[in-house]
Amino acid sequence: MEWFDPLLTEYSELAIGFRLALAAVLGSLIGIEREVHGRPAGFRTHLLVTLGACLMIIVSEAYYFKYANLASDSVLRLDPARIAAQIVTGIGFLGAGAIIKEGHAVRGLTTAACLWVSAGIGMAVGAGFYFPALVVVGISLFSLMLLKRVERHFRRDRYRSLRVHCEYEEECLPELEAFFEERKLRIVNFGFEKDRTHGEIVYNFVIAQSGTDDRNKLVRDFMSLKHVNKVRFN
């Protein structure tokens, strides 16, 4: 596992420097891919996450070996896995900050997962597991750069918010339902408001769109319906 350590003292300055430098390089590889796609957590963030995780693992191991020979009745108890557990917990807060909810869409999940993986890579390098760290980086880059192209061929449901202002007519709702069925739009949630003063009914839909219809085209088609006055499509 530890390719270079047999040639070096386990915790020599050169060995520690090598681990930190390798962690920084591996983290930056994932960060560059995120930076190219304009994500808020990009090159520098991933580099620092991997580097910090690596340093904390090195310090954790160093403390354990430094105080491993304490007497059994000592009040000091050492757990080398404690810092690693705290890294996993802490990176969760950082990942949560990268997730953004826009309407019914959630963005940033992949970036949050990249931060989590970057922390794991840094921990692996800090513990001397260089080969698993390199394998994970390779698989991660393959997933981010190539599998995204494969995903484009999948048909996925897209959730939209739709607000339709109709004339105060009973025929409006059946007309809308027939329109949804014709275009394979599935109603996920539904509500309505009646405004007798202005003589209209406002329908609020959350719909799942599995087809490839353009949003602008759908709005134009909605406006062509007899009893529809106004449409808002998010």
Image (cartoon, rainbow, N blue to C red):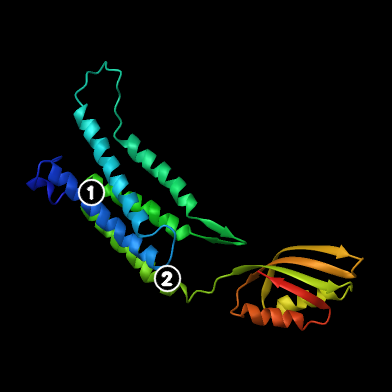
Q: Residues within 10 Å of mark 1 (few under 14, many from 20)?
A: many
Quarter in which the C terminus is drawn: bottom right
Question: Residue at point 37% right, 39% down?
Answer: 85
What is the x, y in percent for residue 169? Answer: 89, 74
User: Which residue is under mark 2?
Assistant: 148
**Mark 1 lies on residue:** 20
Tell me which residue sits at (14%, 41%) in the image: 10
Q: Quadrant of residue 198?
A: bottom right
User: Is 138 above or below relative to 65?
Assistant: below
Q: Is residue 16 visible?
A: yes
Left/right of residue 48 with respect to residue 61 in the rendered view: right
Label 2 neighbourhood size at 10 Å, few (<14), some (14-19), many (20+)?
few
- SS label for mark 2: helix
In three-dimensional space, the C-alpha distance between marks 1 and 2, rounded to whole angstroms, equals: 30 Å
As shown in the figure, which amino acid type bears the numbered disc 2? Lys
Q: Give how far across and how far down residue 223 sits, in percent.
A: 76, 80
**What is the quadrant of residue 42 in the picture?**
bottom left
Please tell me whether residue 127 is drawn above or below residue 80 in the rendered image. Answer: below
